[in-house]
Image (cartoon, grey):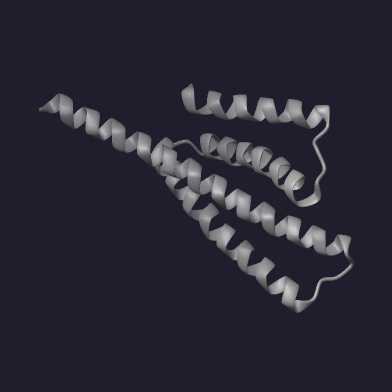
Amino acid sequence: MKKRAAERKRMNETLLKILAVVVLFAGEFFSIYSEMLAARSAKTHTLTLAILAPIVLWMCFAGLLLLAGYFLGYLSARNIWVVTVTSLGSILIAEPLLIVFMFGEWPTLGAWIGLIFAVLGMIAAFVF
């Protein structure tokens, strides 16, 4: 009976960590998406209220996700550094992907190396 309760608790903790990572990643994704929309508007030299309003709404949504992600991340990890590393790792994963899809530009060798180290750092923060 105690063994089953311990397994259930461990599974709940694991699910909370996964949820925190997903919410943080989504928050960073939508935040960067908003920034890229603004940059793309600058590329065409137009930023009207009709263009700005959805960008601001996406950023507000992203902010709510980031707040929830930091809350859940700290709740599950009890270490702000783990949450911060996850957030930074999410940025280094999401931003290059969005740049490729929105601008059609590929990362340089240094950006690829940075991405690899970010992923390794995020894994190390969670494992150790």
- Where is residue 116 shown, x and y percent of the image? 68, 26
Which quadrant: the N terminus? top left
Q: Who's the residue at 88% across and 64% down the image? A: 44
Instruction: State the residue in front, 127 or 75.
Output: 127
Q: Who's the residue at 49% across and 28% down the image? A: 126
Placement of 41 over or under 3, stated as above or below: below
Placement of 51 over or under 74, stated as above or below: below
Question: How many marks can you see?
Answer: 0
User: Which quadrant of the figure has residue 117?
Assistant: top right
Q: Is residue 86 left or right of residue 77?
A: right
Q: Residue furthest bottom?
A: 49
Q: Who's the residue at 76% across and 46% down the image? A: 99
Q: Who's the residue at 74% across and 72% down the image? A: 51
- Where is residue 96 shown, x and y percent of the image? 73, 41
Q: Is residue 71 left or right of residue 41?
A: left
- Where is residue 83 shown, x and y percent of the image? 52, 39
- Where is residue 6 shown, x and y percent of the image? 21, 28
Instruction: State the residue in front, 31 or 54.
Output: 54
Q: Is residue 19 left or right of residue 48?
A: left
Q: Is residue 91 left or right of residue 123?
A: right
